[in-house]
Each structure stands twice: as structure tokens, then as C-alpha cells.
Amino acid sequence: MADEHSNAEASETFISHLVELRNRIMKASIAVIVVFLCLMPFAAQIYDVMAAPMMLALPAGSKMIATGVITPFLIPVKVTLLVAFLLALPIVLYQAWAFIAPGLYEHEKRLVAPLVVSSSILFLVGVAFCYFFVFGVIFKFINEFAPKSITVAPDIESYFSFVMTLFIAFGVTFEVPVIVIVLVRMGLITVEKLRSIRPYVIVGAFVIAAVVTPPDIMSQLLLAVPICLLYEIGLLIAPLFVRATQPRESSESA
């Protein structure tokens, strides 16, 4: 009887977790959809803003092309959905942390908001860095390198795919300090170990940059150098974060 009772409780707990996960995903999805619907009337203007770095690099009077029948409609919608997700990112991250929070100690729960805010800000800063600085360097290099016999007329679908890849790459790159801090705080790895593998991280940063960015040294440096710098920032902040989040009892005993 005891075994049956414990199995029933475990089953109910598992189902309750699934229900909670579903509710959190629904709330995050609703937030994105609401923002998307509000932005949808301005989809064409939003795409023009995203295309601005490329248009500035093209010769005067140049335009992008659309080779698909529904591409002129579909790509601005996808861009608007991306912008909606970025704007709703704090709510999405909060729902993720709220799902995890019940399994944390009380002193850890107080840190959910700072982690959510910092993660959101860092991701958006990474995307902004890519849009305002990296795109200008990359597109200028590509168009200056192109032979004079070629008319540069980028396809909007290929442009969107390229932009998405770099946005995600730079957004995730700027999350490096948060990743380092969380790994150290959870006890999965020590700061000393992270410092000892610094050379491998530097090599890995340049390998990732070489794969993600166009094959010019400036673009690779623009991704690899921030990874290395943000890794060092994470190493500096992680010990402070660990001390600040220790249970009161352990800090007093220390």
C-alpha cells in the first residue's frame, strides 16, 4: 500500500509539473503573440529598418529583390515576429525562471529577477551591437570586394536568414557572463578551472567566429573578441555572485 501511495504521489507531482510547464509556455507564447499583433500593421516599416544597414552599403539607387511569390509578404512577417520575440523576451525568460523557482532555496529565488533582467539586457545588447556596428563592417566589406561587373541585389529571404544567424550568434555571445556565473553558482565548475581552460576558450571563440561570420578577419574579430572579453567579465563577477547567494547560515559560519 505504501508503495502504491508513493507511486500515486509521484505521478501526481509529475503531472502537476507538466501542467505548470504548459501554463508557462502558454503565457510566454501569448506575450509574444500580443506584441506581434500590435506590430503587424508596421511590418513593412520594420523590415525596412532591418534592411537599412545593407541598403546603406549598396550603391545609390539599389534595391533588394524577392524571388518568391509570397516572399514580399512572408519575410516582413517573420521579421516582425522576431522583433516581437525580442520585445517580449523579459516575459519569456521570467516564465522560464518561474517554472524553475519552486525547486530553489529562498535565497536563490531572490536572484531570479536580476538574472532575468541581465539575461534580457545582454541578449538585446548583443543584437544591437550586431545591427549598429557589425553589419556596417560586414556589408561594406562584401560590397567593396564584389567585382565591378556584378550588380549586387541581395535576395530578401537570404538576407533574413543571414541576419537571423548573426543576431542569434551575437545575442548568445553576450550571454557568456550569465552562463559562466550560473555554472559556477550551481557548482558544476570552479572559477579556477574556468581560468585554467582560458586558452581553449579563446581558440573556441575564434573557431565559432570563423564558422558563423563571413570569411573576413574583421568580422571574425568582432565576434571572437567580445566572447573573450565577456568570458573574463564572467570570471570576475562569478565569485562575487557566489558569495552574495550563499545561504545565510553558511556565510555566518564561514
Image: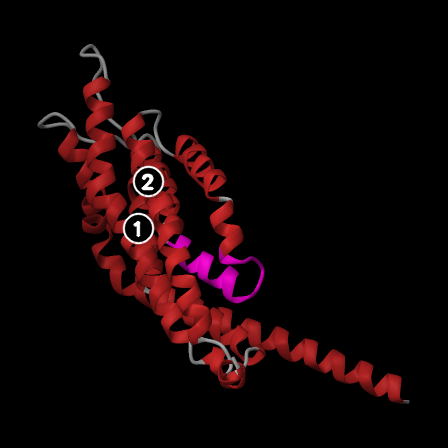
Up-down: is 92 above or below 204? below
Q: How many marks?
A: 2
Give the residue displayed 46% in from the left and 43% down from the top: 198
Give the residue displayed 56% in from the left and 57% down from the top: 189
Percent from the top left, x then y, of residue 51?
22, 40
Crowd tier of the residue under label 1, counting other residues whose Cα lies within 10 Å: few below 14, some 14–19, many 20 or above:
many
- Furthest residue toward right: 1
In which quarter of the view is residue 92 placed?
bottom left
**Is residue 70 shown to the viewer in this render?**
no
The residues colored magenta run: 175-191
In which quarter of the view is residue 233 placed?
bottom left
In which quarter of the view is residue 7 placed?
bottom right
Up-down: is 158 above or below 188? above
Percent from the top left, x then y, of residue 109?
47, 79
Residue 225 is tagged as 2
Q: Quadrant of the N terminus?
A: bottom right
Magenta segment, principal secondary structure?
Answer: helix
Percent from the top left, x then y, of residue 27?
45, 73
Its colouring scheme is: secondary structure
- Residue under numbered circle 1: 126
Mark 1: amino acid: Gly
Crowd tier of the residue under label 2, counting other residues whose Cα lies within 10 Å: few below 14, some 14–19, many 20 or above:
some
- N-terminal of the two: label 1 or label 2? 1
Front-most of residues 27 and 192: 192
Distance from Cα at disc 1 to Cα at disc 2: 13 Å
